Amino acid sequence: MQDGKWQVSHGPFESYDHLGETNWSLLVQAVNHWHEPTAALMRPFRELPDWRIDDLMISFSVPGGGVGPHLDQYDVFIIQGTGRRRWRVGEKLQMKQHCPHPDLLQVDPFEAIIDEELEPGDILYIPPGFPHEGYALENAMNYSVGFRAPNTRELISGFADYVLQRDPTGRQLLQRS
């Protein structure tokens, strides 16, 4: 946030010096797809089907840094790597989303039902649709493991694809009664 306004920049970046010592975060998405050592963080979650696993995102934040209150439409496990970060989670209610910046979708402030300070090694689970926000209390790094939760349309489409892929003759598999 700069001058009370949310800012978003897309990398790669040459330097972070101009950002100062407070109120910014660096997010790197899908790290497990290109960095094998971080992919090890995904191993405890391998009991889940591959189609549910989205990615591992790493967030580095300086004091006060965060992305503001927001919703995710997937399950997420927040693993605190270094430093301390305060996390607030609200009730799953119908919330109006707004864009303080075209690349940043947020919700209005909410009353927290969970308000916890995470330290290295702590893990917080946030189900889909629950408003949440996290901000660093000191230089901090956390890892977010995201899991897709398909909607009805995706489930039906996926099933249809499955059926079509397994019937090479093209004959009708489902009979009308």
Image (cartoon, grey):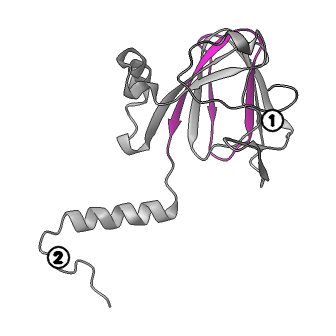
Residue pictured at 74% horizontal, 9% vertical: 138
Vertical order, 147 against 175 (above or below) = above
Of the numbered discs 1 and 2, the one sitting upstream in the chain is 1
Per the image, the residue denoted by label 1 is 113
Percent of width and height locating residue 74: 57, 44
Residue 84 shows in this picture: no
Residue 25's disc is none
Q: Which amino acid does label 1 sit on?
A: Ile
Q: Which of 131 and 29 is in front in this view?
A: 29
Task: Look at the image and say whether residue 139 sits in the magenta stretch.
Answer: yes
Per the image, the residue denoted by label 2 is 170
Vertical order, 26 against 72 (above or below) = above
Range shown magenta: 120-148
Q: Which residue lies furthest to the left in this view?
A: 169
Quadrant location, the N terminus: top right
Percent of width and height locating residue 25: 68, 21
Element marked by disc 2: loop
Residue pictured at 77% horizontal, 36% vertical: 69
- Image quarter of residue 37: top left
Task: Look at the image and say whether residue 65 sits in the magenta stretch.
Answer: no
